[in-house]
Amino acid sequence: MIIAPNKRIGIWGFGVVGKAATRYFLEQGYHVNIMDKRKPTADEELYLKQNNIQWYDQEEQETFFYSHDHIIPSPGINIDHMRYATYQDKWLPELDFFHNTFHKPIIAITGSIGKTSTTYLLGQLYKALNIPVTVGGNIGIATFSLISEQKNVDCAIIEVSSFQLNYCTTFAPTLAIWTNFYPNHLDHHATETEYFLAKQNILAYQKNNHIALVPFALRNQLLSIDHQKRCYFNATLPHINQLDALNHNEHLYYIKDGMVMHYNNKTHTFLLSLTPTLCNLSFIENILILAAACDILALPHNALHDVAATALLPAHRMEKIGSINSIHFYNDSKATTTASTFAAVTKLNNHPLHLFLGGLSKGVDRAPFIAQLKSYVKHIYCFGKEADALHAMCTTHVIPSSSHVSLDSAVHECLIKLQPHDYVLLSPAGSSYDLYENYEKRGEHFKKLIMHYIKNHSSP
């Protein structure tokens, strides 16, 4: 994407993406200014002065928009529809810019749950095969920071959120992976349909030489594919009538008898055996997606076994903290949706489970999810701003529970109740912003509390 050197770049939001964008455009010789609702820190003030950057307060929006030729909004900023329409020619979405500037293949991964683990493990797979890649996006490394690496890598693997996808008009990854779809971020997207359409942008602008890997359950809801190759995955083999409805451009990956299989043109092909080590690496749906991606990308499937033997998922994703007196503790703070929490709960099925729920619902009704938990949990500890509401939902469904202002209080009660062979799981099903800066801070706090307990109750 070519931007004339005399153009003024306005960056809305000075977080991870905003800072990376600022560095990138300064290095390219552009004049950059910033707008944010907060005040800059002392270090940021110095950076602004050194680089001749003007900081606009949020109240100065109209002046900011009018004074710049291109506006780069940070993900998560909820742009008013009227303002978006007024300045439509000025918006420069992060992913559109990346797609037009990064000239190697792009593998993009989105989904309501599982996208971070899938992105990370696919990156580990490339590493195991000694294929140079760059990994980033919504996992904490902005795409602006990946552009300079393209000379040294074969492709980019990026996690993308609905916030990033929402305003895209050109983003077209070589391979688009959509892990699943569940209601989420309804405090940002006006409706579930709007959230779905934002997610669908991951494949909306793909060309016929691009490929999408999506849940089979979404097949009838997605944009028509014309001559594009499209791949689906499903945990089980669909009914024969559904298979017969697939055309020659549609491929299906599924699991049968502990094996990952591929189906196309009425032919079933074995790809991979699901060994215990592989199944323990992550949720089975993530493993199926990775196996399918290997087949699509012509990578050796057996490399997944090497990844399973060596790779560990990033922290705060079903992270085993430790055990004491046959009691086991897990940190799944990354679970900010009801779907991800339910997946974690079912993974620990058949164990007496103490579950910590909390955080903000993001506009999603958590009552139906809580109704499903009755046969899975021994006690639910509700904490944070919505603790009383969560506790009331548990009471309605006759699930043992308690309400706590803080995680400290919830953990304290839990530790008193524990018995041998119990399992303890922090998997909040909500965002962290009622009590913590992010889910990492929440997870670290939980780990600190548990490690202190284990240390003080270990035998000398």
Image (cartoon, rainbow, N blue to C red):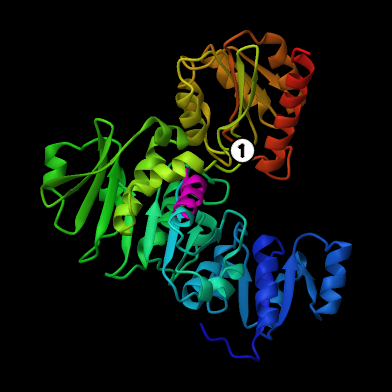
Total marks drawn? Answer: 1
**Residue 229 position in % (x across, y down):** 24, 61
Residue designated by label 1? 316
Whether residue 281 sits left or right of residue 64 in the image: it is: left
- Residue at the location (54% across, 64% down)? 81
Q: Is 325 in front, or is 157?
A: 325
Q: Quadrant of residue 320?
A: top right
Query: Looking at this view, is 263 or 232 the one in front?
Result: 263
Q: Which amino acid does label 1 sit on?
A: His
Q: Residue 366 versus residue 457: which sits nearer the camera?
A: 457
Element under disc 1 = loop
Residue at image point 68% right, 9% down: 417
Camera sees residue 181: no
**Which x, y percent locates residue 96?**
49, 71
Specify start and end residues of the magenta stretch as a single range. 114-125
Does residue 215 appear anywhere in the picture?
Answer: yes
Q: In this view, does 192 lie to the left or right of 259?
A: right
Quick check: 139 above or below 87? above
Secondary structure mostly taken by the magenta-highlighted segment of the chain: helix
Q: Residue 419's spot in the image, x, y percent?
A: 63, 8
At x 29% / y 53%, what residue is drawn? 295
Q: Position of residue 196 (x, y in %)?
A: 42, 51
Q: Is residue 330 left or right of residue 298?
A: right
Above or below residue 275? Residue 402 is above
- Residue 117 drawn in magenta: yes
Count neighbours of disc 1 (C-alpha within 10 A) and say few if under 14, some if 14 to 19, many if 20 or more: many
Q: Quadrant of the C terminus?
A: top right
Where on the picture, by quarter, is residue 238?
top left
12 within the magenta span: no
Q: In the rendered view, would you say 233 is above or below 93? A: above
